[in-house]
Image: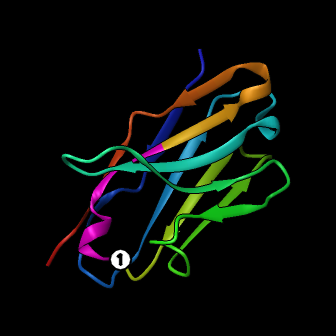
Amino acid sequence: QVQLVESGGGLVQPGGSLRLSCAASLSAFNIYVMAWYRQAPGKQRELVASITTGDKANYDDSVKGRFTISRDNAKKMVYLEMNSLKPEDTAVYYCNAAAFRLGREYWGQGTQVTVSS
């Protein structure tokens, strides 16, 4: 059974940093585009950042310059380094793995990030 398990969320003050991790029990991890999404209360889930199989990263404009996504194919891990956090970054963050050509997409259970003083 495929699992994506997030960790690293928590409470942080504005301007602080957090590092989210996602451990994937996927065979052929390297064929998946990995991404982080977030969902704030009362809002739709939105794409925060993604990283392709060739390590090309893309970011939502709201996090550019503050967040960094990376992946370690050998460890089957994906990370989201979040700096200069703002209260509006508060949300549940979800790890996503997608191989659309194969019709496969998986989600983690989410980890809460709260930015508050």
Is residue 85 found left or right of 70 in the rendered image? left
Q: Quadrant of the N terminus?
A: top right
Is residue 43 found left or right of 50 in the rendered image? left
Which residue ends up furthest to the left in the rendered image?
Answer: 117
Residue 81 vs 50, above or below: the answer is below
Q: Quadrant of residue 17?
A: bottom left
- The magenta-colored residue range is 85-94
Pinpoint residue 38: horizontal percent, then vertical percent.
39, 50
Magenta span includes 73: no
Residue at the image position 32 percent from the left and 66 percent from the top: 89
Give 22 or 59, whichever is nearer the viewer: 59
Give 61 or 34, whichever is nearer the viewer: 61
Which residue ends up furthest to the top in the rendered image?
Answer: 1
| Badge 1 amino acid | Leu
Q: Quadrant of the C terminus?
A: bottom left
Residue 40 vs 11, above or below: the answer is above
User: Is there any visible trace of residue 9 in the rendered image?
Assistant: yes
Residue 107 vs 68, above or below: the answer is above
Is residue 32 found left or right of 34 in the rendered image? right
Residue at the image position 29 percent from the left and 54 percent from the top: 91
The residue pinned by badge 1 equals: 85
Pinpoint residue 40: horizontal percent, then vertical percent.
26, 51
Task: Give the secondary structure at mark 1.
Answer: loop
